[in-house]
Amino acid sequence: MIPAPLAAPSVDMSVLEAHDLIKTYEVGRGFFAPPGVVRAVSGISLRLAPRKTLAVVGESGSGKSTLGRMLALIEPPTDGHLSIDGVDVTGVYGARLKALRRSVQMVFQNPYGSLNPRRTIRATLEEPLIVNTDLGPDERRARALDMLARVGLRPEHAERYPHMFSGGQRQRIAIARALMLRPKIIVLDEPVSALDVSVRAQVLNLLADLQEEFDLAYVFVSHDLSVVRHIADDVMVMYLGGVVEQAAKEAIFADPRHPYTRALLSATPVADPGRPRDRIVLTGELPSPFAPPPGCSFNPRCPIAVERCRAEKPALHGEGDRLTACHLAE
Ligand code: SF4
């Protein structure tokens, strides 16, 4: 049987909570120089309830994938607290950590890279059950076939290999594998970015159906706001390892308050091509995390920066769940 989670959730409990999560890496700078420290993620807090989706958006290098790996318990945070289903996972090791890991699974951008090419799909789906449960072969097989059906594949697909499937089918298989241990949370790292546009909507619809069916909470990491619009309940916008804006999806899309969010939104396609849109073109590259700019980390690229922005780092502030890190945000 699949063991019970470590703590029973209460009705109103968040299934995932993070407080002031920090991730730093030491990077060598030559033989005689001391190692440098890169702050990949800086002081992030969030809460996520069952059946809800938090989208984490930002450019490449914003720290969103590092955050995703910490939330999926693949990398430990350098500092801060992380709770899954009410259990603080910080400082948990061994069997307890292994049990907690069953509650949170990850789906990656490239399904071909995350599936073993020498294993049949049935063997891939059964593997987590072999490692984590004492189910017999017949029960494992039945569960694998059942999960294949739930992600829209047929029983005859079970004995085939990953190269025999399309990209969309492979991502369905990766999702099925993530669900085999009935997790409560799935971290999806750019899950549809590598798929054809025509297949994206199908996979997004499948994710929405599975969320309802299994009471799943999703952390949806993406650079693409047009995809986020379809799936998110809340949106967190990251820049250079920190959160610059965080709000319900409707608020972010109707009234973006941070200049970086406005620039990202201005670059997304609109449903009505006749509707005018002022494209905000950001100049310059994302600054190096080795040497972040003083003051607001966005100030070298911000079209409305003022003197204060170069001297003082804005705190994430606002009312309720509507938060912005900008000196000029109303
Ligand atoms: Fe732009 Fe200043 Fe706001 Fe930073 S604090 S986003 S530089 S206006």
Image (cartoon, grey):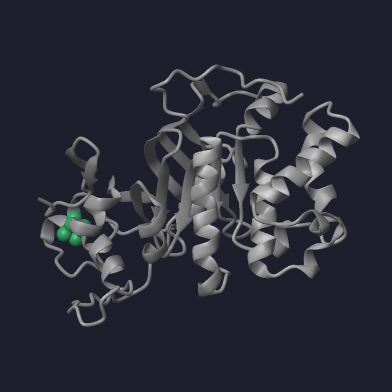
Q: Residue at x 73, y 26 (%)?
A: 2
Q: Residue at x 19, y 77 (%)?
A: 277
Residue 303: x and y in percent read 18, 70
Foreground of the two, 74 or 23: 74
Q: Which residue appears at 22% of the width and 51% of the height? A: 251
Left or right relative to 2: residue 58:
left
Residue 9 seen from this side: yes
Vertical position of residue 55 compared to residue 164: above or below:
above
* Quarter occupied by the N terminus: top right
Residue 43 in the image, given as x and y percentages of width and height:
38, 39
Closer to the camera in the image, 281 or 6: 6
Residue 140 higher or lower than 240, as above or below: above
**Residue 285 place in picture, x, y as percent:** 37, 72
Q: Is residue 38 visible?
A: no
- Residue 239 appears left or right of 299: right
Q: Nearer the viewer, residue 209 or 43?
A: 209
**Residue 304's quadrant in the figure?**
bottom left
Vertical arrangement, residue 321 with respect to residue 30, above or below? above
Question: Where does ligand 1 appear, by image quarter?
Answer: bottom left
Q: In the displayed structure, would residue 12 be above or below residue 177?
A: above
Relative to the observer, which residue lies in front, 53 or 190?
A: 53
Label tally: 0
- Residue 198: x percent and y percent? 52, 73
Residue shown at the point (71%, 64%) measured from the top left:
112
Quadrant for residue 32, please give it: bottom right
